[in-house]
Image (cartoon, rainbow, N blue to C red):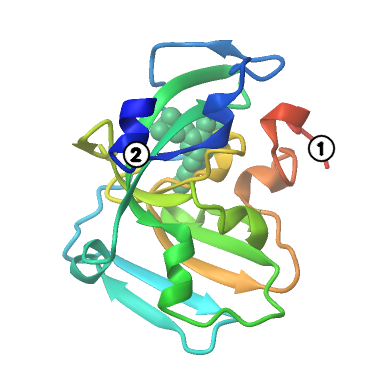
Amino acid sequence: MEKLKAEGVIISPDTERKQRIPPGQHETPAFPVLHYGPVPQIDTAEWTFSIFGLVDKELELSFEEFIKLPQIKVFSDIHCVTSWSRLNNLWEGVPANAIQNLVKIKPEARFVIVHAANGFTANIPLEDFLQNDVLFALKHNDKPLTAEHGGPVRLVVPRLYFWKSAKWAGGIEFVAEDRPGFWERAGYHNHGDPWKEERYGR
Ligand SMILES: Nc1nc2c(c(=O)[nH]1)N[C@H]1C(S)=C(S)[C@@H](COP(=O)(O)O)O[C@H]1N2
Ligand SMILES: [Mo]
């Protein structure tokens, strides 16, 4: 951990808890693959990232433009609501809060809707989205994200259950009123804090 810090890696605060496994979870060394529907095969030449909704000027970036943005490394734990936790993940990609340097987010914006392949969405309070350990990951443990795990680009929100970490991300929308996403409409909790066991229901 000290070595990572010295290298400038952002340490997600939950990894520094004495007890790292939240209530009702168990640790697994595996990296299960979990999502609804087929794995989309995304050609980076065609991939775009859209920033829209409550911003001063909507923006669309190509993959080439996206990977030129400043990048960070984040060390975090994964907590899936189905009860597995995978510790010690190193992610690399574009910090979510860097979006603020690209567009001006209007003061009415209170939630972020992450848009992903096949119409998948996840809703996240703006405050949670702008934490310094949230990123659009391009790499996991020093290797490009595989398609199964959400490549080329997935969101990672370390402090919430992993269903908020939308794979195959293609854009974000800023909204004033909350709009429950795919798993939230299917009965998952609207917020999803693993330390409060916000698993199902509101
Ligand atoms: N686009 C998309 N992203 C998604 C999902 C999904 O169904 N579609 N499922 C979520 C859920 S429930 C989990 S547990 C994690 C699993 O990520 P992994 O397959 O890399 O372990 O992805 C999340 N992101
Ligand atoms: Mo999940």
Q: Is residue 110 visible?
A: yes
Taking the spot 61% from the left edge, 23% from the top edge, the residue there is 17
Q: Position of residue 182 (x, y in %)?
A: 61, 49
The amino acid pointed to by label 1 is Gly
Q: Which residue is mark 2?
A: 91
- Give the image location of residue 38, x and y in percent: 38, 40
Residue placed furthest toward the bottom:
56
Q: Residue 167: horizontal and vertical position, in percent?
A: 42, 45
Q: Is residue 199 left or right of residue 88?
A: right
SS assignment at label 2: strand
Residue at the image position 41 percent from the left and 23 percent from the top: 88
Query: Which quadrant holds residue 44?
Result: bottom left
Q: For ligand 2, give the image quadrant.
A: top right
Q: Is mark 2 within 8 Å of ligand 1?
A: no
The alpha-carbon separation of the residues under discs 2 and 1 comes to: 30 Å
Pointer 2 or 1: first along the chain: 2
Image spot of residue 45 (x, y percent)? 16, 65
Q: Where is mark 1, residue-wise?
A: 201
Vertical relation: 188 (above or below) 34: below
Relative height, residue 13 to residue 8 (above, below): above
